[in-house]
Image: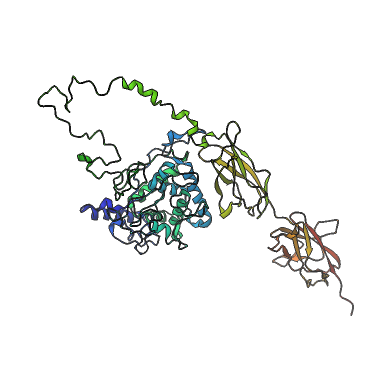
Amino acid sequence: MAAYLGRRLCKGAATTAVAALAVAALSASGAPGAQGVTDSASGLQSADNAPGFQGGDPSATGDSPYYTELPPLKSPAVPPTAGETANGGRSESGIPATVLDAYKRAESSLRSSQPQCNLPWELLAAIGKVESGHARGGQVDGNGTTTSPILGPVLDGNGFANISDTDNGAFDGDSTYDRAVGPMQFIPSTWGQGGPDGQGWGADANGDGKRDPNNIYDAALAAGRYLCAGGRDLTKAPQLRAAILSYNRSTEYANTVLSWLEYYREGTHEIPDGSGSVPRDRSDGGSGGGGGDGSGNRPGSSTPRSGDDDKGNGDDKNGGNGDNDKPRSPSKPGPTPSPDPDDPTKPPGGADPSDPPTTPPTTPPTTPPTTPPTTPPTSPPTSTPTDSVKRLANASGGRLTATAGGTFAHAAKVRAQNKSGDPVGKVRVRFSLVGDTDATFPGGERVATVLTDRAGIATAPALVAGEKVGRFLVRAALVGRAVQTDLPVTVTARQADALVRTGDKELICVPGAQFADAVEVKATYKGAAAARVAASATLVTSAEDATPNDKGPHFKDAAGKPVRTLTGLVTDKDGLLRLPQLHADEAVGTFLLRIATAGGATLTVELKVEAPPAT
């Protein structure tokens, strides 16, 4: 959840002083336009042209509250070995598998669409940690959608920004005021409006046809697009800070995000979904570790509490009405009952020492059998199917080969199997491309995550070969577990199996002149035009001797010198290849030009140099 500094500064004269300090701190940071960029509480306008600062529009999050917990001072924990869980998922460097996958996929997508931005996935992880504790510790389903909506407080001006409803409650369920929504805490007006396409910053990253702010894949890509807006280069510290401030206009927020960014850059690892830790302390003084919808309402409550998240509306310090999601601290006991003045021997509260005890001492021994502590670890049926996967087997059905620029005859497939070799369905498998290749999945992606079907088969999206020829790997990894397998892939050069001249005119020239007509050929493969096929042309010595001739017709280089071998030729999109102009020296006779393509297609063309007829 993101911050609204005004809530923390609106009491008394501290507002002006602290806001001034915030401005000074930001100016010292070297951010672009630092004299104009301030916290929203200061009331100053920003000179930054990033989204969130234009025309007085709110930031991405509406400056809603955020988690203030800072990363540990020590380095990130060492990742767990295969089959182990990192401290039950509480390790701060561990990120739930699906959430981590979403951050990395967003980085990969933006690397293709906005390469100048240089967005690191660790920045999305830092914001995701501060906004929602990585979707409440990875509480997402197989498609990456949160198991219940994550909503910020009502932005009704009561300690927060005042943003009237902009989506008729479509995203946040509130038709009066807006609320920040989802694991990256976008407000509806930002998610559904503006943006580079005029349709809002919301994204459909998982290809389900919806822009869902409660889906971690959609939300992570939207956050990345928002941070990259305005042509930013996030390798430059001032632009990085400006991007974070556009997300939430609070210097404390920016500093917290930068702390987590550096922490995650030192190292992180996957942990199972749902096992991550959830921060407690928030910028509005509340505690966000409980359940419910993230709005501050307790589970089952239908009444918003205007941002007093997890704080009771009674005065807990003075024995309020108990409407508080956190248990009362034992260090603050309530009033102690006075002894009975008529019988000082009675303990406080009126109990008589001779009365039988209300909690028989024999009750505790009966408790262990009813709640055995070892039950959860020994109940595999209640665990996720991911835990039962022993291996991922290659199920592609054939070699993964394709011609450059083409599609593969077989899709990359793996079968998830348990220890007995039985298929495991409904587990997530992440396919990623490993090696020097420009092949991609649809949309230019290098990573794709899919669910296994009932037969345990996970089928990667259709690969499209690039122009780079050679071998690489498709790595299939089980999301949430250290189980993976590599599938070898080969991309071969484009080929042609036939070459023909496009004209039939005899090629004749007199000594010392140039041929009037250029040589043009068409390459085909299985009857279709062979586009972008590599070719060479050589003026050979004879039909039996393919070495270059040292006399007769020739091409010319840039300096005008004779050249009798051309390499690096490529057919055009229609399979056509037009050779440079040919020239003749003083030698007369019949000469041979041999053209060859990748794939073995060859064509030999006769060239005649004849002396002019006597006059």
Q: Quadrant of the C terminus?
A: bottom right
Protein image colouring: rainbow
Can residue 211 be seen?
yes
Q: Quadrant of residue 298?
A: top left
Work out whether residue 356 or residue 497 is closer to the camera in this orientation and state it: 356
Residue 247 picture location, percent across and down: 38, 54
Work out whether residue 298 or residue 132 is closer to the camera in this orientation and state it: 298
Q: Quadrant of residue 556?
A: bottom right
> Relative to 326, does residue 464 appear above or below in the rendering?
below
Residue 576 picture location, percent across and down: 72, 64
Identify the residue at image location x=46%, y=40%: 273
Q: Residue furthest left?
A: 342
> Relative to 509, does residue 549 appear above or below in the rendering?
above
Left or right? Give the position of 574 relative to 12: right
Residue 235 picture location, percent across and down: 45, 53
Identify the residue at image location x=22%, y=33%: 333
Q: Residue furthest bottom?
A: 615
Total number of numbered discs in the rendering? 0
Left or right? Give the position of 255 relative to 545: left
Left or right? Give the position of 287 relative to 573: left
Residue 6 picture location, percent across and down: 28, 54
Work out whether residue 347 or residue 445 is closer to the camera in this orientation and state it: 347
Can residue 234 be seen?
no
